[in-house]
Amino acid sequence: MRSSLRTHLTYWLTGPLLLLVVAGSFVSYRIALDAATKAYDSALLDPVLAIASHLRRTGSRLELDLPSIAIEALRIDTEDRVYYQVLGPDGELIAGTPRLPAPPERLAPEAHVFYDAKLEGERVRVAARAVKVEPGTAIVQVAETLVKRDKLVLELLVASTVPQLLIAFAAVALFWLGIGQGLRPLDRLRDEIAARSPRDLRPVPEQDKPQEVRALVGALNRLLSRLNAAIESQQRFIANAAHQLRTPLAGLKTHAELARRQPSTLELRSLLDMISGETQRTSHLVNQLLTLARAEPGEAASGDQPVNLHETISRDLRDWVQRAVGKNIDLGFELDDAWILGEPLLLRELAANLLDNALAYTQPGGSVTVRTGARDGESVLEVEDDGPGIPEAEREKVFERFYRIPATGGEGCGLGLSIVSEIAERHGGTVELSRPPGGRGTLIRAVFPRLAAQAAHAVLPVSTRTVPTSR
Ligand SMILES: Nc1ncnc2c1ncn2[C@@H]1O[C@H](COP(=O)(O)OP(=O)(O)OP(=O)(O)O)[C@@H](O)[C@H]1O
Ligand SMILES: [Mg+2]
């Protein structure tokens, strides 16, 4: 019952309906039975009257002046046995069976009564009449067994109950269908909410909902807006904290550098080196946190504009090449136009984190390839390396915040891939992690809904595009 509103409602409607059916059947059965009893009773009175009209007085004796063949004719019935009895004014038996009981009440002359009795253990219906036979009154009674009456009772019972039961079943089926139909807005609401992306905390439209659902949607919307406010405030806090930490960290970094240039002992120098390295890592962490806070939902996607992923990569190309050369990594670019609608700064962070990983985790002498391009309906950015690769079992975990594969070297804080997936999701895209076709290393591909080049050009002049650089 608890699991389904529909079942619950159907139960609630079916119970009272069945009660009504039972009561209705009973009433119509009683009415029909009364009418039938009256008809049978009046038929039972006919032989009583026939016998009464043949009572004669001869001298002081009262007798029934009816040949036995006529009496038998009166008693004929296809289904029931019929008995008769004539009692004189003093209660003496004039004719018929002695075994019938006396009428339940004293009868006035020419009055009659019907009653139920038992004759040798068998139920009978009796019609009794007082007949004037000066002096005094005689009692004529005719009784019949109840075979045809019982049969009629059963027929009436069936006739009054079956149609009502059929109607009741039909009604229950209609309830079931009708309630299902009535609950459709709830199904639609469920679909509407299920179809949302987890980061979509916009209020659910209320106007098109039925009144009963509107209250629920209203409550849901209030919850969503509180949730939104809570997330925003948390993000603001992280962003502010990271922002506030940046300046003192920059100061610390400068001072550590200055201190290192001063003449000092070996020990002091190595301590200063440590301070410098840790400051470096801390400011990397703060920068990553800030990027994450910016990428998260809640921040209005205000700055969306047509972006060519090709150009996003090209912007920082020199830095990447320098880093790759420094580590003796063969860095190649296969860049084609890949237009999407998005925030240039965030997309740059996305690319930076992917390239940073590839350059950081690929061994010297390895190679890294960056590709951008468009295919049907999608714009793609992928970074492939032939480094150590990411084991199958870690492929989901590496997207968790602060997760690093155990024993990973380098200075990372485990936020890079979370940032990548946040930014991709924010742009309606996805990130796929696999092994390159060569079988060694890592291939990470960010796929976005493609923006048609014409649409992009309409907003952005062609001249701002950079020349593609290839290996
Ligand atoms: N190209 C790659 N090759 C091998 N391992 C990788 C690669 N990219 C990521 N990983 C593994 O996944 C982990 C998570 O990567 P992620 O970029 O999220 O964090 P990080 O690089 O450790 O720190 P951060 O990027 O925040 O500085 C890394 O610690 C590393 O173990
Ligand atoms: Mg990283």
Image (tube, rainbow, N blue to C red):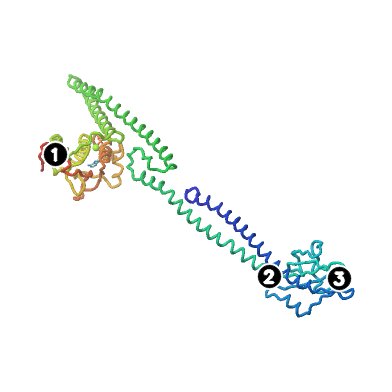
Residues at circles 3 and 2 in contact by the CB criterion of under 8 Å: no
As rendered, which of 202 and 34 lies closer to the eye?
Answer: 34
Tell me which residue sits at (80%, 73%) in the image: 97
Residue furthest to the right: 60
Q: Is residue 282 above or below residue 423?
A: above
Q: Earlier in the sequence, mark 1 or mark 2?
A: 2
Residue furthest to the front: 134
In the picture of the structure, the residue carrying the numbered disc 3 is 92
As rendered, which of 23 and 214 lies closer to the eye?
Answer: 23
Q: Is residue 122 left or right of residue 3?
A: right
**SS at mark 3 in the image:** loop
In the picture of the structure, the residue carrying the numbered disc 2 is 147
Q: Is residue 72 left or right of residue 59?
A: left
As rendered, which of 139 and 345 lies closer to the eye?
Answer: 139
**SS at mark 2 in the image:** helix
- Locate residue 5, reporting x and y percent: 47, 48
Residue 95 visible, this angle: yes
Kind of residue indicated by mark 3:
Glu
Q: Earlier in the sequence, mark 1 or mark 3?
A: 3
Residue 368 visible, this angle: no
Kind of residue indicated by mark 1:
Asn
- Locate residue 452, reporting x and y percent: 18, 44
Q: Is residue 457 above or below residue 229?
A: below
Mark 1 or 2: in front is 2
In the picture of the structure, the residue carrying the numbered disc 1 is 328
